[in-house]
Amino acid sequence: MKRTGAQIIWECLIKEGVEVVFGYPGGTILPAYDAMLDYPSVHHVLVRHEQGGTHMADGYARASGKVGVAFATSGPGATNMVTGIATAMMDSSPIVCITGQVGSSLVGLDAFQETDVTGVTLPITKHNYLVTRVEDIARTIREGFYIAKSGRPGPVLIDITKDAQQLSCDFDWDSAAPRLPGYRPDLRALPSEYQNALSLINSAKRPVILAGHGVLQSGAMQVLKDFAEKAQIPVAMTLLGIGGLPANHPLNLGMMGMHGEAWVNHAIQQADLLLAFGMRFDDRVTGNVKTYAPKAKKIHIEIDPSELNKVIKADVALVGDLREVLEEVLPLVAVGDREEWIDHINEMKGDSAVRDIQNLPDTGHLYAAHVINDLWRYTEGEALICTDVGQHQMWTAQYYKHNKPFKLITSGGLGTMGFGLPSAIGAKFAKPNAEVWAISGDGGFQMTAAELSTAAQENIKVNVAIINNGYLGMVRQWQEFFYDKRYAATPMKSPDFVKLAEAHGLTGIRVTERSQVESAIRQAQQTKGTVVIDFRVEKEDSVYPMVPAGADLHNMIRRPMPKKPLNETLKHEEEMEFAK
Amino acid sequence: MTAHTLVAYVEDKPGVLNRVASLFRRRTFNIESLTVGHTEQPGVSRMTIVVDTDEFGARRAEANLYKLVNVLRVDDVTTQAAVMRDLALIKVSASAATRSEILQLTDVFRARTVDVTNDSLIIEITGTEDKIEGLIEVLRPFGIIEMVRTGIVAMGRGSKSVSPNPPLVAAQVMEVAGATAN
Ligand SMILES: Cc1ncc(C[n+]2csc(CCOP(=O)(O)OP(=O)(O)O)c2C)c(N)n1
Ligand SMILES: [Mg+2]
């Protein structure tokens, strides 16, 4: 049957199972938007900025496991997507971005709103396409979806010229199957290589599993649990691995890395074997690689061969889908007894518990960690949490404990401020029945605050907790620790967030004391539309522990011991001590 | 650091050269030479990439090349039995007094003279990089006016043919004896 290119786009999206797209129209994508009205089964969300659209597609993808879709026009529309695409690339999130391009006869002539967006996004997409012929649209979209979601997922951008959208051709889905002779998402280690891994595992005395995003992306949660339990190996989580093993599982140690738990980092440094499962040894995880886990052999299981031996040399490197590999290894692994090692790690927790802000006397001050801990309590740990980037993000990772996967959505690899609210909106479209909370800083919230208007127009309910410390807090913390407290460009004045919510026809709540936290959360839960809570927290609090960038993983700056009431202690930075 | 010679089979599509070049740039590899041309198979181009890196870097480059959707196969021919050839055109000053000496040298190197004027010669030489460097050195005293080189092309020796589609095994894991990344 004959279809215009614009119609083919929608036909293909429907065939791919797309129910919602996040976009913003403009001249070169107009044909596609015009055709959209004839395909009402796909819901279009009009975003307020194309960056927000890409983050929504990303949040949708991470919450649903499906491909998220974003639309934009050429030129400025497409370039506004760049941050969202780079974010999805670094966190291996499957999104497809469809952009309009100027007519094919104008490409290369600096036409109005022409940007070489395939050139711009070449290094930040898994793959991208410029489509100039209507006949190529269907196959390209099929390939794009396939590439985005298979293997190690990632963003794909498809730039379609206006004339290709306008012209017509025969549309036949079946004959437009992907032709990708060079694409190999299904590489597998040879089973003979498992033996090397097994002998290392079975003889290890102090092993630690490092569980990354790959656990969730390959759906390896159950087999990871079975594996850890059978071999009795404790599990440390990367930021994006959180939820891969229930937080309350006795073998789950917690988060590793720059703001990881002290005992986790010490356990890694003392380990004799690391089992890296679907993670990539980011520098935020390793600290100084020269002193990283010096006594440990390393087994690395990864779907992307280029990650193997990239940062840390593996003694056994296995390519493959983590779940498939673990399912094959699990029956072969010996039942373990590592009580001594696990007891030792538990002993290391002791001193951290004393320092933990949750265990300090309540001084009436509003600490971010308390807010997040309360939020965890009053949402029964069941909420789908989307964070922005900064101190509040790290506190969320530390204090909002997830027992289920796909419940924490956060920009890990790129650390993109402005990610929180739009990713929460996207996640809500994926999981309409979930209680969705965005936890943002006062700085990052303002980067994409315009998406409140999207939430209002869509009548969609997300709750936004702004951890308002009056600073670009994470940067302030670095200035406090490493730049002699010279607060260059980090104090930030913000609008009245309550009024801002109200200006959008939404509900705003202000919280200045610990005693108000519960009722504010309850009110947000009971209110119909989107609610913004402005939590006015302690201004100069810091995230502990902290491994300074590039320092040895065991050299953490620890929260000062409570010699005085906490509010005073925190102000005395000279008491800051470096753990041995 | 040593030169590594990679042969990449790629789909003959717009922008593929850009993808490969961009990969080497953003992963901070230094390309010494890169040549592209057709192969015996329609739709498949072949690149010979000489990159200045250690064994570890070469494996990293290879693994990253495989991540490009349009790359079909990559071989590191550095230590394989392979024929490697570079072609140079060298324009050199030649007066009546020096011409015959230059022509003699050209003969010794089995190079060819492809253009003669009253005061210059263009010499064409094909061979390994060493051989070409050798000729350049002996011509330099006469005055090199202009020079161009194609960069290396490489081909494995023997009758076995190379399919652009490698088997789906873990062969692409970077395994480097003795190399430590950390
Ligand atoms: C787009 C972007 N710009 C700059 C940064 C650098 N940065 C990292 S954290 C941070 C401060 C964030 O402040 P805020 O949103 O108030 O959160 P807080 O750390 O105070 O919780 C900044 C500026 C970034 N990560 N992303
Ligand atoms: Mg802040």
Image: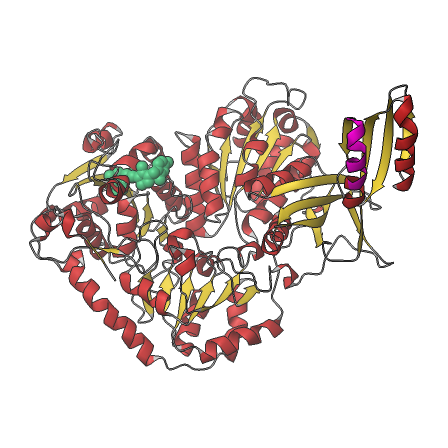
As displayed, is residue A250 above or below residue A357? below
Picture mark count: 0
Given residues B75 and A338, the one toward you in this image is: B75
As displayed, is residue A274 above or below residue B159? below
- Residue B23 can be seen, yes or no: yes
Q: Which residue is drawn at 31% across and 53% down?
A: A547
As displayed, is residue A462 above or below residue A322? above
Assess whether residue B139 is covered by the magenta stretch.
yes
Assess whether residue B5 is covered by the magenta stretch.
no
- Residue A441 can be seen, yes or no: no
The secondary structure making up most of the magenta span is helix
Residue A458: x %, y % from top left: 36, 35
Residue A427: x %, y % from top left: 39, 46
Residue B5: x %, y % from top left: 70, 49
- Residue A245 falls in which quadrant of the image? bottom left
Q: Give the range drawn in magenta.
A: B134-144
Residue A246: x %, y % from top left: 34, 65
* Ligand 2 rendered quadrant: top left
- Residue A165 falls in which quadrant of the image? top right
